[in-house]
Image (cartoon, helix red, strand yellow):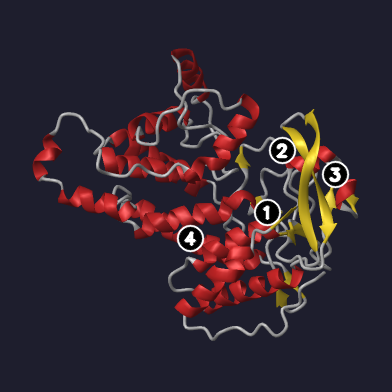
Amino acid sequence: MIRRVALLIVLLPCMLAACAAPQVQQTTPPPDLAGFADAIHHWRNVHGDEYPRHAPEDVAKIADNILLYQRADGGWKENEDPARVLDDATRARYAEEARKSGGSFDNRNIYTQVAYLATAHAITGDARYRDGSLRGLQFTLAQQIAGCGGWPHTVPATESYHPHITIADDVTAGVLGMLRQVLDDRQRYGFVDAATLARVRDAVARGDACLLRLQVRQGKALAGWAGQYDAATLQPAQGRKFELPSIAVQETVGVLRYLMAIPEPSPQVVAAIEGAMAWLRKVEITGWRLETFDAPPEQFLHHSSGKDRRLVADPAARGLWARFYDVADNGVVLATRDSVRVARYEDIPRERRTGYDWYGNWPRSLLGKDYPRWRARHGLPEESRAADGRQG
């Protein structure tokens, strides 16, 4: 999509540069809103979905919203729908909010706005979008954690886990993916000056090294990644109260997708990918499937549900993973909102069973399709499936 945008811009007649006001080129596909899916989901969980929204083709209006949401130092608050149609009172409230500083990388935030504004600038030529993207990029670079090279959850911190090096919700991997686009896509990010590009290049090198350093080791074997790490000790740390220190499968998949997208991976990156893939196969759960069933409707603080979930024994079942595994012994880690680790899924109260994905199939397509293609692309020998160590 981005290459088509860039090609259109190059081929436009030079006389268009003299137009008095930038206009969206209707033949150019709009930037994808998929990166904001988490933000939109969380917004609707609180506010519902009965509100007017701009169409995805309304690039300038959406980009204007993103600029309105941007804070003074270039960051963004999390969980906003950029496509909302805003009335004057709401716009005034956001303008006041923008006087604050800081922001959150949670739920794939900040780097998504940087990328959207860069694309909006490529489409419209509006310098405001270029400037907003650059401010967001500079904010992002300023927040890289010095001790290792990852990124925090939120600044300034208001919760104990906010300063941690955060892998959850693709915080560090997502930022690094955007920074690599800045380096590689010089059509879209041609406005980034040489000094900032040098900072981006250094941030990518430090971030990649940090990911390799944080990978959990079990004896001599490489495993997956935790959701967050203490920035001082670099040990797996607790997230929210029910997210105990552990290896996180969904987060491991996100890191692997980032590492596998590196065009020329180093031997260290290859080893990290191979080790994590072997670990994912080792902790796959067979003989059980997750079942969702009807239950009396109930309203909780952050969501409502007319369903419940349970694990059902099924000898033919496979392709299920727990979200969290013990760092030492790979036991499944389950917990309540009071940080109490429990042994069984049914011991988690219904609010957390239905409001959080404790089990899922996150690695399935990665293992079944993407990983074999990655190996073939880099000339690695076909892997042996003789001993993949699945756990029942």
Location of residue 50 in the rendering, given as x and y in whole percent from the top left corner: 55, 23
Position of residue 71 relative to residue 321, above or below, is above
Which residue does the numbered mark 1 point to in the structure image? 231
Locate residue 329: give its quadrant: bottom right
**Which badge, 3 or 4, is on the more N-terminal residue?**
4
Which residue does the numbered mark 2 point to in the structure image? 159
Residue 207 in sight: yes
Give the Cα separation between the discs numbered 4 and 2: 27 Å
Residue type at mark 3: give it: Thr
**Residue 86 horizontal side relative to residue 153, left or right:** left
Disc 1 and disc 4 in contact, CB within 8 angstroms: no
Residue type at mark 4: give it: Val
Position of residue 84 relative to residue 174, above or below, is above
SS of the residue at dot 2?
Answer: loop
Residue type at mark 2: give it: Glu
Which of labels 2 and 3 is toward the front? 3
Residue at image point 54% right, 86% down = 381
**Which badge, 3 or 1, is on the more N-terminal residue?**
1
| Front in this rendered view, residue 68 or 207 | 68
SS of the residue at dot 1?
Answer: loop
